Amino acid sequence: MITDWMDTPPEPVRYPAYEINQEIPPLERVRRIHLIGVCGTGMGGLAGMLKQQGFRITGSDDNVYPPMSTYLENLGIEIWRGFDPAHLEPAPDITIAGNVCNANNPEARAAREQRLPTLSFPQALGRFLVRDRYSLVMCGTHGKTTSTALLAWVLAHAGRDPGYFIGGVTNNFPESCAMGGGPEVVLEGDEYDSAYFNKVPKFVHYRPRGVTLTNVDFDHMDIYPTVHHYRQAFKDLMALIPADGLLAVCAENDAAMRISALAKCPVMTYGTREDAQVRALELEQSPAGCSFTLLFPREEPRRMRLPLGGQHNALNALGVIIHARSRGLTLDQIQSAFDAFGGIRRRQEVRATVGGVTIMDDFAHHPAEVRATIQAVKSLYPGQAVHAIFEPRTNTSRRRVFQKDYVEALAGASSALIKTAERKHADEQGELFSSEELAADVSRMGTPARAIATVDEMVSVLRQEARPGDILLIMSNGGFGGIHDKLIAALRERFGDG
């Protein structure tokens, strides 16, 4: 019998159980906190915030290099390269395990054996950052980082001094995590699991009062074996929002809308559709960003400007407006903050323009993000060729389930170069994505595409073929083998310093 996915929860995934001591001492008795995997963006931001609260912070990581290592050292945080049980001597009052830390990590194993009080990274955010404040959590498959950064900035610009955690680097804040002193805290609500011993979505720990649900598209297949399991995480989120909270949900996404029906709190829908309560109409775009006419209940229609391109960012802005208005800000205050928003690194970030060729970096990796980013960049640079350079790097993008979705996404570009997907030890052959097959299918759609094995080969091709006016849109959620700097150097060699 076929049942609707809203009706029946899926069978739970069984994970190994670990005995973790989570009896955390009262904060007034805490002196030293040790972070395992301290150099990640989120963990490093947390380390800085905890240091500023007066705790002695130590940390360890395999990858200790600038800029994060410099940032932590400048704060007086002691960092060790590599993982060693000796780093837990004398025993810290609290140990925090980042997602880089698995059960076999030497420090994680020692912490278990010694019964050291241990928290996952999101548990620590809930305990040290959220506390009893009004928690605004930005959730969904895509758009979380932009929505979080924008809402935190809107509140900060209005003098609200919010706490925040942003899963990216912004141009408005000096760090990704800050305590703030105001009544609100804004957090990026990731659905990825919290730690090897804490297999629940990160947002579970953030005590959400105000939530944005941007969209629900299948992702993180290494954690969620089926789309049913993935959607269940967001269905569970609805039960966490109290009746006096507020849910903003994007009306453009059917799964998000269906899930929002489970919420016990007031729900406000946003989008471009006629049935949305908050709407963006008459969208116009330019290299400076976009503008749209805002229809908001009990407000006169007004034109809003946003220094970000693409309809997806206009939709993100609507969710931000809903929560900012709910916290008492005026549309004038919101627009003033939008005007001063500096954007987020790796979101349509122009790294350089050399010889008239623009090198742009973007974090897009899910097919929906790749499609939206290409469309946004094309609308920002009308008449210019947008060449997609894509690295299938994540556990999701390297699996065959999205093979066809990437065809449609990349076919919107002027051409595509696809890095050959690298195999990992745990990959199952039958599930593997094929860069070569993707390139052939995209080419059949009328967009020239090639699969290329190495970054150096890609740079060589682009150095030879790029023309003034071209946009080279590089999309990956990782470093992509340093392709950005290599490409800039190659183009400068060809064109001069540009």
Image (spheres, grey):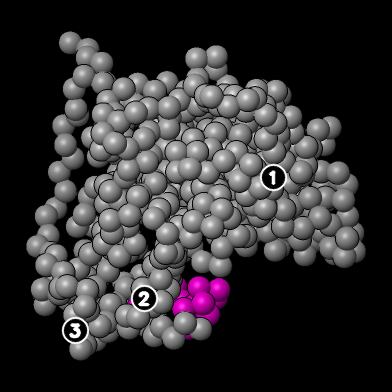
Q: Mark 3, residues whose alpha carbon is within 10 Å: few (<14), some, or many (≥20)?
A: some
Distance in Å between CA atoms under marks 2 and 1: 34 Å
The mark that comes first in sequence, 3 or 2, is 2
Judge whether residue 290 can be spotted in this image: yes
- Residue at 50 percent across and 14 percent down: it is 275
Residue range corresponding to the magenta coloring: 59-73
Rendering coords of residue 379 (x, y %): 74, 32
Q: Nearer the viewer, residue 4 or 122?
A: 122
Kindly report the distance in space between the C-alpha atoms of the residues bearing marks 1 and 3: 48 Å
Mark toward the viewer: 2 or 1: 2
What residue is at 17 percent from the left and 10 percent from the top? Answer: 1
- Give the residue displayed 16% in from the left and 36% down from the top: 12
Q: Position of residue 317 (x, y in %)?
A: 57, 38
Which residue lies under the disc numbered 2?
Answer: 53
Residue 464 placement, left or right of 56: right
Q: Give the residue at mark 1.
A: 307
Q: Which residue is mark 3?
A: 91
